[in-house]
Image: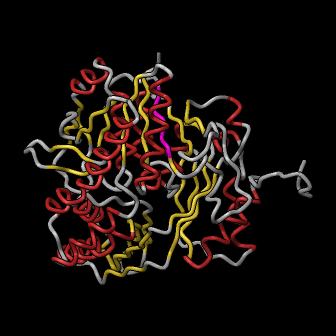
Amino acid sequence: MSRIVMKFGGTSVRDIDRIRHVAGRVAKVRREGHEVVAVVSAMAGDTDRLIRLAHEITPDPSDRELDMLLSSGERITSALLAMALSTDGIPARSFSGRQVGIHTDSTHTKARIERIDGARLEQSLREGVVPVVAGFQGISPSEDVTTLGRGGSDTTAVALAVAIAADRCDIYTDVTGVFTADPNMVPRARKLDRISYEEMLEMAALGAKVLHSRSVEFAMRYRMPLRVLSTFSEDPGTLVTEEDRTMEQMVVSGVTLDRNQAQVVVCDVPDRPGLAATLFRELSDNALIVDMIVQNVGQDHLTDISFTVPRSEARKTLRIARDVATRIGAGQVKTREDISKISIVGVGMRSHSGVAARMFETLAAEGINILMISTSEIKISCLIDEKYGELAARVIHSTFGLDRNEPGDPSRG
């Protein structure tokens, strides 16, 4: 008998019919003799609806009250799924994040899990009851409700799987697994049977929406087997696992396009030690995540510092950067949001040369200018004009041989 955590996203529980369908999937696994913990997101659209309601009340709702409001969506779904399971003859009990002991830090709207007390889950499993946990939420040291940020239900599921020593964690979505690119953007993208933790972490961080990056971090750190599969298909999905030699044979495993990007440029920063540190420390202290950074050496001992942040954080970043610029004697601060980040990911980059050159040449051949570049051992990212994003994804996908080979396809080898 295995112990399995099954997480269902918002589209999987969009309405009552789908919640009943999810109950059927959970019941099937339970009747096969496995211990099951279900984790659920809010019903599709509910979180956005709650945010709109908040902004109808005030243009600047407090983060604490937002957390209290938004956490209700997952609690509603967990209660409904528990009812559906009970109706299907499977004993079930719903739990909030607080009730299952998910303790977080005090950062509202994007808290991080610090520890989990899994005693109530263990008790339910011993009693033969399926715990249905509201994802995305926890409790702060001051006992305020916190949320984990968008996609935080994935993180909840993996963290719970680790806490109760589950055999695996299955993430159910509306797609059949992890693809080499977004199939809606690149029609010839193909599903991967396996992908390494490192590759999946990079792809999630770079905009692939199939998994939340923090959930992959948990899985990689604790070597928790992770499977991505569809709620609406019997396809075995994609296994996220440790790297093996066969993975290195593929130079690039995936292409991602992140449209949630904003570029910030702090102009005419005095070229003195410590000023860049002052800027980025202030951003860090305000829980802002900076991605790409470029410092251009200018004239008259002045420099421009360019960096990117999530587009949703652009307004807050601009306000803080302008305040810092005034204090350190820098010039104006500019932003632009009509940009996207195109990236390639693959553990095979470690053992193959010329990958960056091929990517840059492909973009140049399409007349696509590169604004910024960022690299890691298994990733290359380029900031480009937003209007070229999908074109860049398609041509790069083809350049690195990721297109699906179909019967009758002239490119089939």
Residue located at (62% from left, 55% from top):
344
Which of the 4 image quarters holds residue 250?
top right
Residue located at (24% from left, 58% from top):
70
Residue located at (31% from left, 22% from top):
125
Residue 302 in the image: state x and y as whole percent: 35, 77
All told, the count of numbered labels is 0
Q: Main secondary structure of the magenta part?
A: strand
Residue 134 in the image: state x and y as whole percent: 29, 44
Which of the 4 image quarters holds residue 155?
top left
Residue located at (26% from left, 40% from top):
113
Which residues make up the magenta segment? 168-172
Residue 78 in the image: state x and y as whole percent: 31, 44
Relative to residue 116, is residue 159 drawn left or right? right
Rendered image coloring scheme: secondary structure
Residue 328 in the image: state x and y as whole percent: 21, 73
**Which sits in the foreground, 392 or 156?**
156
Q: Is residue 279 above or below residue 388?
A: above
Residue farthest to the left, as pictured? 142
Q: Is residue 118 above or below residue 152?
A: above
Residue 63 lies within the magenta run = no
Q: Is residue 279 above or below residue 322?
A: above
Relative to residue 195, is residue 395 drawn left or right? right
Residue farthest to the bottom, as pictured? 332
Q: Is residue 144 above or below residue 385?
A: above
